[in-house]
């Protein structure tokens, strides 16, 4: 109870949101003379001044992706490990990286399945814009970002994809960008030197597909031997709309596949790990989301 009271107090102080950028600070006026006591008593209490959430959740994560050498080394190392594992995956006809792969796939041509956002292309400038605006996620702002076709490459992605293509591996991108964003997404990829086509970029909303990628993985596995999968989220490999504790349990069931068939790219900014902290509920206010997250934080005496 004490923790919830403390959380509520903190959020009352710093939990408000403004969807506009910082305005210049107003000019400092001379302090007015104190009014007579009678006048002070007669005046109604002033409404609380609007405030902004300066300690934005995206701040550290966006800056880490944009500036940290550690981020770049992690992504390059992950793609280097995937490159080293590719030869063994192609050489073993019984090798598969998809739990959806049914029956004998040894005669099928090889394929790799990848997520797009924060796996092949990175959107930290979109996350940074939220920080600068001190705002939560905005679908309209996301649409503007996608239409700008300005996402950059995750370090290490292109050399790996070029090598896989040279080895005759089909490459499929399973993205939870909406079908409406598909044309911009393909154009963005091509501009970055990543070949992409309508049949190789499979988006949520097409063919009745939801954000759960199971059906799309099964579609690829029906015609190809899936030799490797890469993503930044547990849901890129298995269903992950679970509690944080269950997500860890499910991930550990496949411990032998991580780093050999499945490769995870770092994403500290967003994902199903984040939504799990507030039970994957939609429609919550920003304040309620922050309350639930703060209730999850463990301190020195927990």
Image (cartoon, grey):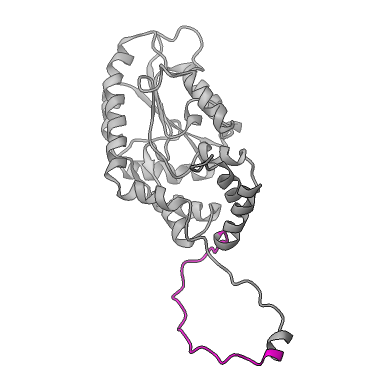
**Number of numbered discs present?**
0
The magenta stretch spans residue 87: no
Say above or below: 104 vs 42: above
In the displayed structure image, the side of residue 234 where residue 163 appears, left or right: left
Q: Is residue 156 visible?
A: no
Q: Residue at x 45, y 31 (%)?
A: 199
Residue 92 falls in which quadrant of the image?
Answer: top left
Instruction: Check the image and name the residue furthest to the right.
Output: 42
Q: Camera-side residue: 241 or 279?
A: 279
Rendering coords of residue 145 (x, y %): 45, 53
Residue 91 falls in which quadrant of the image?
Answer: top left
The magenta stretch spans residue 37: yes
Rendering coords of residue 50 (x, y %): 58, 69
Q: Camera-side residue: 10 or 224?
A: 10
Rendering coords of residue 171 (x, y %): 38, 27
What's the magenta bit mostly, secondary-structure-wise? loop
Q: Residue at x 45, y 35 (%)?
A: 198
Q: Residue at x 40, y 50 (%)?
A: 60
Quarter occupied by the C terminus: top right
Residue 11 falls in which quadrant of the image?
Answer: bottom right
Q: Camera-side residue: 30 or 171?
A: 30
Rendering coords of residue 169 (x, y %): 33, 22
Say above or below: 106 vs 126: above
Q: Which residues are magenta?
A: 15-38
Say above or below: 126 vs 220: below
Say above or below: 5 vs 278: below
Q: Residue at x 47, y 57 (%)?
A: 55
Q: Is residue 5 visible?
A: yes
In the displayed structure image, the side of residue 27 where residue 277 appears, left or right: right
């Amino acid at each position: 109870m004490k923790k919830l009271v403390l959380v509520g107090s903190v959020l009352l102080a710093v939990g408000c949101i403004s969807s506009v950028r910082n305005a210049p600070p107003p000019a400092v006026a001379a302090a007015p003379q104190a009014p007579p006591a009678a006048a002070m008593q007669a005046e109604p209490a002033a409404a609380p001044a609007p405030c902004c959430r300066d300690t934005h959740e995206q701040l550290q994560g966006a800056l880490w992706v944009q500036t940290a050498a550690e981020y770049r080394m992690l992504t390059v190392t992950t793609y280097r490990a995937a490159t080293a594992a590719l030869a063994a995956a192609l050489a073993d006809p019984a090798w598969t990286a998809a739990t959806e792969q049914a029956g004998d796939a040894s005669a099928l041509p090889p394929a790799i399945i990848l997520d797009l956002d924060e796996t092949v292309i990175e959107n930290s400038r979109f996350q940074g814009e939220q920080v600068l605006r001190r705002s939560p996620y905005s679908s309209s702002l996301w649409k503007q970002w996608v239409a700008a076709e300005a996402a950059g490459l995750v370090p290490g992605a292109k050399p790996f994809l070029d090598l896989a293509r040279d080895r005759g591996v089909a490459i499929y991108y399973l993205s939870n960008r909406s079908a409406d964003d598909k044309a911009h997404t393909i154009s963005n990829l091509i501009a970055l030197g990543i070949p992409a086509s309508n049949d190789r970029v499979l988006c949520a909303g097409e063919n009745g597909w939801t954000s759960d990628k199971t059906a799309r993985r099964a579609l690829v596995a029906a015609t190809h031997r899936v030799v490797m999968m890469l993503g930044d989220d547990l849901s890129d490999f298995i269903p992950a709309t679970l509690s944080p504790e269950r997500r860890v349990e499910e991930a550990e069931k496949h411990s032998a596949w991580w780093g050999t068939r499945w490769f995870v790219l770092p994403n500290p900014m967003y994902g199903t790990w984040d939504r799990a902290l507030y039970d994957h509920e939609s429609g919550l206010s920003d304040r309620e989301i922050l309350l639930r997250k703060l209730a999850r934080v463990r301190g020195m005496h927990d």
